[in-house]
Amino acid sequence: MHGKSLILFFALLGAPAMASGQDAVPPPMMMWPDASGKVSDFAKTYRSCTKDSYALRQIAACDAALKLVDREVENLPNKQEERIWFLASLNLHKSIIYRRSDQFADAIKSADIAAIYLPDAYQIQQQRCWVRAVANTELETASEACSKAFSKARGHASRHG
């Protein structure tokens, strides 16, 4: 499949896999209370970003969580990897929220920011494809993102399925 046929493929396939949030959960370590029994502010805002039912509160929570990422990961052994994952995940969630609210320019911007952090994540490339296809804009970029998402997803499925 090439070009616009990939856009059609994803349009027929449906919204990105991470749109439901099922694949975009934070690592388990941050969801549990710390030794003092507290859940971090970051964990609370991350959950609000991904689970709140009101789009404006979700965006505000995503923005708040983005400001807290560095503090959250500073004591982790793989802090740079965790930081990149959280920054990509939060921006992907913002893109999904914006797309659902028909704010396509913001959805595209957030998806592109997520791709800066994790350019090989098929869910992010799928979102970049999907939001542009729905908005009927930047179809060349959409086609490139669809191609990348399709090739990465195929590799992901062969390793995990």
Image (spheres, grey):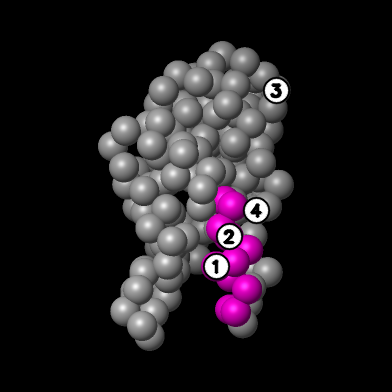
Q: Compute the Cα span from label 4 to label 3.
A: 20 Å
Query: Which quadrant holds the N terminus?
Result: top right
Name the residue that disc number 2 marks.
69
Q: Earlier in the sequence, mark 4 or mark 1?
A: 1
Residue 72: image tag: 1
Q: Compute the Cα span from label 4 to label 1.
A: 19 Å
Q: Do the residues bearing badges 2 and 1 touch, measured as CB atoms within 8 Å? A: yes
Q: Compute the Cα span from label 1 to label 3.
A: 37 Å
Magenta span includes 47: no
Q: Earlier in the sequence, mark 1 or mark 3?
A: 1
Q: Earlier in the sequence, mark 2 or mark 4?
A: 2
Taking the spot 47% from the left edge, 60% from the top edge, the residue there is 42
Name the residue nearer the viewer: 142 or 21.
21
Name the residue that disc number 3 marks.
140
Per the image, label 1 sits on a secondary structure element best described as: helix
State the count of labels: 4
Magenta residues, start to end: 66-76
Q: Earlier in the sequence, mark 2 or mark 3?
A: 2
Taking the spot 44% from the left edge, 45% from the top edge, the residue there is 61
Residue 5: image tag: none
Name the residue that disc number 4 marks.
118
* Residue 98 x %, y %: 47, 28
For mark 3, does the 10 Å Cα neighbourhood hold few (<14), some (14 to 19), or many (20 or more) residues?
A: some
For this orientation, the residue located farthest to the bottom is 35
Magenta span includes 67: yes
Q: Would residue 147 be found to the left or right of residue 59 on screen?
A: right
Name the residue nearer the viewer: 90 or 128.
90
Taking the spot 51% from the left edge, 48% from the top edge, the residue there is 64
